Image (cartoon, rainbow, N blue to C red):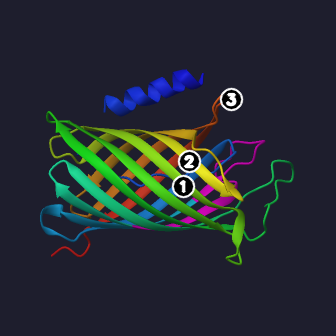
């Protein structure tokens, strides 16, 4: 099962300029989840050479006994990213993220493990190769290393206090019209990580995420809207899929003259 899933993901990655979208976070062991993000994207340099993207997002999830994707509050995210287009087909970015996440027990009544949640500070960078194929197809490949710091609510380090994670993603976008205001987007992403808990664990595959979006751009309103679905495939020998409903609302270049 794992080999089949990996083969499907790699096929998507290596058979896929893609528009940016905000990726929902994984929320751990659950059945269904929802994600809403409101963002602001602003071009800072000439010919879109520097772009700032800021967003606030929140996620909710079901309990293990139902599929109500709005049942429990799961996570709050505040993220800032600066991206630099240093070549026609190459982009580099770095980001800072603050996250507050609730973890719930796996048995009824599914109370929170820590009544005040867990905090995370994340530093990451991303190197992306972008290309435009024919008139209606854009694709990209990216590598994203992350350094994650975990804290209890009082900002004391959590038992598993640090993680180094690598993300490999392929992205494919189909433009549905010549103005490129309507698009279908699919992404496939693989995660590998090592976590410190007294000692560092070995670097190992952790999960995969498959996303499908419909994106529409409203130039006069300076808005970009994404409605999508993500399947978070967790585990190796036994794979559990978590279904996510995704909604992103992005305000584009509000300070443009």
Q: Are marks 2 and 1 in contact (CB under 8 Å)?
A: yes
Residue 121's tag is none
Q: Are marks 2 and 3 in contact (CB under 8 Å)?
A: no
Q: Position of residue 172 (x, y in %)?
A: 31, 37
Separation of marks 3 and 1 at Cα, in angstroms: 24 Å
Mark 2, Cα crowd under 10 Å, few <14 / some 14-19 / many 20+, is some
Taking the view exactly as shown, the residue that stands out farthest to the front is: 199
Mark 2 or mark 3, which is nearer to you? Answer: 2
* Chain-order first, disc 2 or disc 3: 2
* Chain-order first, disc 3 or disc 1: 1
Tag 1 residue: 164
Q: Secondary structure at mark 1?
A: strand
Tag 3 residue: 238
Residue numbers of the magenta segment: 59-80
Residue 193's tag is 2
Q: Position of residue 123 (x, y in %)?
A: 47, 65
Q: Secondary structure at mark 3?
A: loop
Judge left or right: residue 155 versus residue 255: right
Mark 3 or mark 1, which is nearer to you? Answer: 1
């Amino acid at each position: 099962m794992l080999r089949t899933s990996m083969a499907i993901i790699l096929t998507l990655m290596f058979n896929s300029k893609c528009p940016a979208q905000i990726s929902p976070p994984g929320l751990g062991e659950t059945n269904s989840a929802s994600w809403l993000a409101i963002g602001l994207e602003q071009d800072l340099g000439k010919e879109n050479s520097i772009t700032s993207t800021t967003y606030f997002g929140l996620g909710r999830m079901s309990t293990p006994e139902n599929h109500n994707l709005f049942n429990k509050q799961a996570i709050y995210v505040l993220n800032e990213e600066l991206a630099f287009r240093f070549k026609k087909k190459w982009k580099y970015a770095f980001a800072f993220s603050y996250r507050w996440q609730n973890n719930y027990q796996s048995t009824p009544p599914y109370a929170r493990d820590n009544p005040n949640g867990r905090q995370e500070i994340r530093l990451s960078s991303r190197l992306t190769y972008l290309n435009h194929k024919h008139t209606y197809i854009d694709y990209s490949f990216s590598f994203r290393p992350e350094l994650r710091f975990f804290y209890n609510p009082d900002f004391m380090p959590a038992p598993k206090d640090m993680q180094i994670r690598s993300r490999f993603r392929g992205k494919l976008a189909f433009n549905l019209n010549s103005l490129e205001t309507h698009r279908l987007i699919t992404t496939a992403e693989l995660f590998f990580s090592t976590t410190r808990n007294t000692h560092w664990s070995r670097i190992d595959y952790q999960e995969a995420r498959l996303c499908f979006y419909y994106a529409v751009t409203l130039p006069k309103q300076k808005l970009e809207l994404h409605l999508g679905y993500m399947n978070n495939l967790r585990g190796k020998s036994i794979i559990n899929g978590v279904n996510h409903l995704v909604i992103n609302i992005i305000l584009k270049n509000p300070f443009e003259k």
